[in-house]
Image (spheres, rainbow, N blue to C red):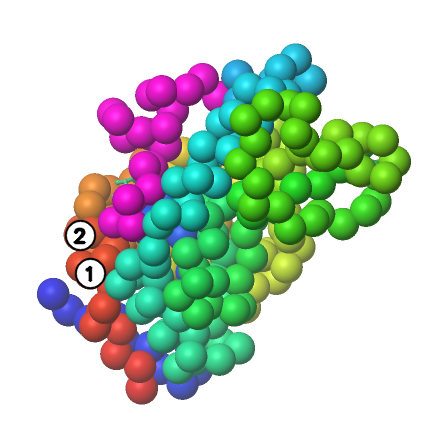
């Protein structure tokens, strides 16, 4: 397999999805045995679900917290942390994942565009910042309230809500010369469109995963393989 060369003038933007955490034992969403095979998005991951049945929403995200707490970063997470270490501020990581495996591997220049499992915030968006919350709730009665009276909700971007940090993400993509997309099916926007933004700016675009994503046509190169087996040693940094 040929290595991806990164020179001193490259700026690298990385987008990761559930596939990068698959080898850590966390299920992806759209695999046959994935999360969306066992749950309906409409029941656990929409503003409407939160209004109708917050207990079910919290049951789903409590189960995600329990699974996430048991998982460890895999060689793909470590390879990206090492690349950041080599490139400094010429590296930027945007993850769709709500687990904290990138941070635990050492990544620092990252944003969680779809939120973070380990945080909660006021359902009323009253302006108070998200709070750290690792609790695994077994009933709604255990879930705390904000000082304004609103119930705490998962700090997760539900379907129909706008992802976080879009201005910063857009600015980072505009500056990048190489986009690496790892382990995402290319089915959820706006993330699935980032590759097109990068191409419009003339960047090289590389996808890494065991099967081509839905938007494979937009990549200059597709590297087929599991992230944890492929990423270590993939980059040659000049
Ligand atoms: N290494 C790399 N990629 C892998 C691996 C692996 N070991 N195993 C599976 N994959 C790939 C699959 O081929 C698939 O393309 O990971 C991708 C997972 O796709 P999805 O389940 O659709 O997950 P993702 O693209 O992250 O979903 C996007 O959808 O439900 C929402 O908000 C949720 O952030 C999520 C968004
Ligand atoms: Zn509040």
- Magenta residues, as a range? 22-42
Given residues 226 and 189, the one toward you in this image is: 226
Given residues 42 and 185, the one toward you in this image is: 42
Query: Which residue was labeled with disc 1?
Result: 230
As drawn, 230 above or below 39? below
Query: Can you tell which mark lies on residue 225?
Result: 2
Residue under the image location 69 percent in, 18 percent down: 51
Q: Is residue 38 left or right of residue 2?
A: right
**Label pair 2/1, CB-CB below 8 angstroms:** yes
As drawn, 112 above or below 93? above
Q: Position of residue 72 (x, y in %)?
A: 34, 55
As drawn, 66 above or below 150? below
Mark-to-mark CA distance, 2 and 1 = 6 Å
Secondary structure at numbered mark 2: loop
Q: Is residue 199 left or right of residue 125?
A: left
Q: Is mark 2 within 8 Å of ligand 1?
A: yes
* Labels 2 and 1: the sequence-earlier one: 2
Count the numbered circles shown. 2
Q: Residue furthest right?
A: 148
Q: Is mark 1 within 8 Å of ligand 1?
A: yes
**Image quarter of residue 230:** bottom left
Q: Is residue 137 left or right of residue 130?
A: left
- Which quadrant is the N terminus positioned in? bottom left
């Amino acid at each position: 397999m040929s290595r991806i060369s990164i020179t001193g003038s490259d700026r690298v933007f990385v987008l990761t999805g559930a596939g990068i955490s698959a080898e850590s034992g966390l299920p992806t969403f759209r695999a046959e045995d994935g999360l969306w095979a066992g749950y309906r998005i409409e029941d656990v991951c929409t503003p409407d679900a939160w209004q109708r049945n917050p207990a079910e929403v919290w049951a789903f995200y409590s189960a995600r917290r329990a699974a996430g707490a048991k998982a460890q970063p895999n060689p793909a997470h470590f390879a990206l942390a090492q690349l950041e270490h080599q490139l400094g501020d010429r590296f930027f990581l945007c993850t769709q994942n709500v687990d904290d495996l990138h941070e635990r591997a050492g990544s620092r220049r990252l944003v969680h565009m779809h939120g973070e499992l380990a945080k909660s915030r006021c359902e009323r968006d009253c302006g108070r910042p998200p709070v750290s919350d690792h609790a695994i709730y077994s009933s709604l009665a255990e879930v705390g309230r904000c000082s304004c009276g609103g119930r705490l909700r998962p700090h997760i971007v539900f379907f129909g809500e706008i992802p976080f940090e879009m201005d910063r993400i857009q600015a980072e993509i505009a500056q990048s010369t190489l986009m690496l997309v790892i382990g995402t099916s290319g089915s959820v926007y706006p993330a699935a469109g980032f590759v097109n933004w990068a191409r419009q700016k003339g960047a090289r675009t590389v996808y890494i995963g065991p099967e081509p994503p839905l938007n494979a046509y937009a990549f200059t190169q597709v590297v087929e393989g599991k992230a944890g087996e492929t990423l270590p040693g993939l980059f040659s940094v000049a």
